[in-house]
Image: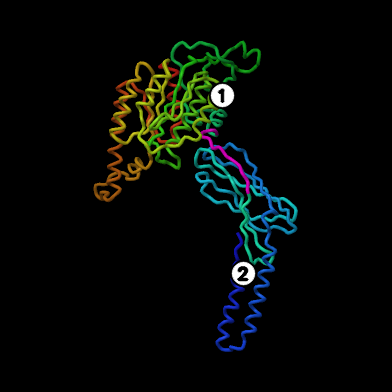
Amino acid sequence: MIAPTRNLCALAGGPAILTLVLYVFPNAWPVFIAVNSGLIAIALFDLISVPRKRSFRANREMTHVATRGEKHPVTLSIDNRSRRTFNGFVCDDRPPGLQDEEFEFPLSIPSRSRGSVSYSLVPRHRGVFQFEYVYLLTESRWKLWRRYIKLKCLDSLRVYPALKQISRYAMYARLNRMSMLGVRRQRRIGTDNDFERLRDYSPDDQFRAIDWRATGRRLKLTVRDFQSNQSQRVIFMIDCGRMMVNESGGQSLLDAAFDAALTLSFVTLSQNDQAGLLCFADSVLRWIPPASGRRQLNRMVHAVHDVHPRFAESRFDEAFSHLHRHCRKRTLVVLITNVIDDQNASRLKAHVANLVGRHLPLTVLIRDHEMFDPIDEFGPVDEAEPNEGPSLYRAAAAADILLWRRQVLTDLRHAGVLTLDCFPEKLTAPLINEYMRIKSHHLL
């Protein structure tokens, strides 16, 4: 698309002023025609110098796998095959749902050369995104015309959840610094005496765990690690219905559930246990049977990268019927959901309580900041100057919902169900701690 610039519009204003002169000097029309003809000739001559689309080629360099919420580098390369220097702007495609900002960069490319620009995008949502074009903005030689060029450049980007979080967990685990992520060391209870490995001594280890023979051979303090019961099963049931549509703290409740579930899956598989996944809304959306090994984590990550919440009522009956049909062995069932009304809470309690005895259910409720923050913002009550207005009613409503949720959790615990109630950004560490506690106490 070719459009005139401000310079051409300013030049066109000159003949417009001359038309007023014709009212005073009617015989000056030959001058008026000459000026207009000259301006048209200049504009047409400059129009010929507008760069053509076939003189450019675009290439996009990036890795095709990204993590939601993490910076992803992209490099755009433009080949200038014309005989003129390109001076203009380059802008990359913006797939819906991938990025909110439009990146436009100035670029100068000599004739028959290549120029490049680099930037970083931050994916906000999971899924598969298609890049189709690279856009160029260039001007003519005398800057009277502007041309928008759309170059075909096809690429795809898969945005996965929790990849950076998993790698961060693995790094701290190797360095024996899990406390920095909020994960507590659990003291083993019972008789798990199966030897697992030898490792370097750390200040948190007990002296009786030191292997003196290995220490003598290595001339370095070495301790023995003993493994707990293995080959146990953990299945994550993640609600993808209307209760998980809201966003809290900049991320959706469903994204927080996937991040925590996949990170705990990495921990589970590292303990040589089996992990599985069941996503459901008004029907069963994904089912990954429990298995062990590193490939299982890849299957789970790939299975959920394009699952999005649905504006539909969750069918707990279909999800738990599917679980009963495909899972016979005793399993730790981690249900991650949210409840805001009595109808959902009653269905949740009825189905989860039926698991007690056959399986070990763990119900995780995710809090919404928009619902609970009014309590903290309201502050203490001052009898001299009582708070009034909308904030008072919002705080009262939030307090009522909080008390109701506590009663729901209490009813679940009385039925023999393990429970957690966390904000989305603080979900991963408590979930891992609860899993470690279950393992150390042999509850499964």
Q: Residues within 10 Å of mark 1 (few under 14, many from 20)?
A: few
Residue span colored magenta? 152-163
Answer left or right for 366 relative to 291: left
Amino acid found under the numbered disc labelled 2: Asn
Q: Quadrant of residue 2?
A: bottom right
Residue 327 position (above or below residue 83) = above
Amino acid found under the numbered disc labelled 1: Arg
Element type at marker 1?
helix
Give me the residue at 57% from left, 39% from top: 157
Number of the label disc, if any, that sits on residue 7: 2
Number of the label disc, if any, that sits on residue 260: none
Answer left or right for 422 relative to 114: left
Number of the label disc, if any, that sits on residue 295: 1
Magenta span dominant secondary structure:
strand
Residue 212 position (above or below residue 148) = above
- Where is residue 189? Give x, y as percent: 44, 15
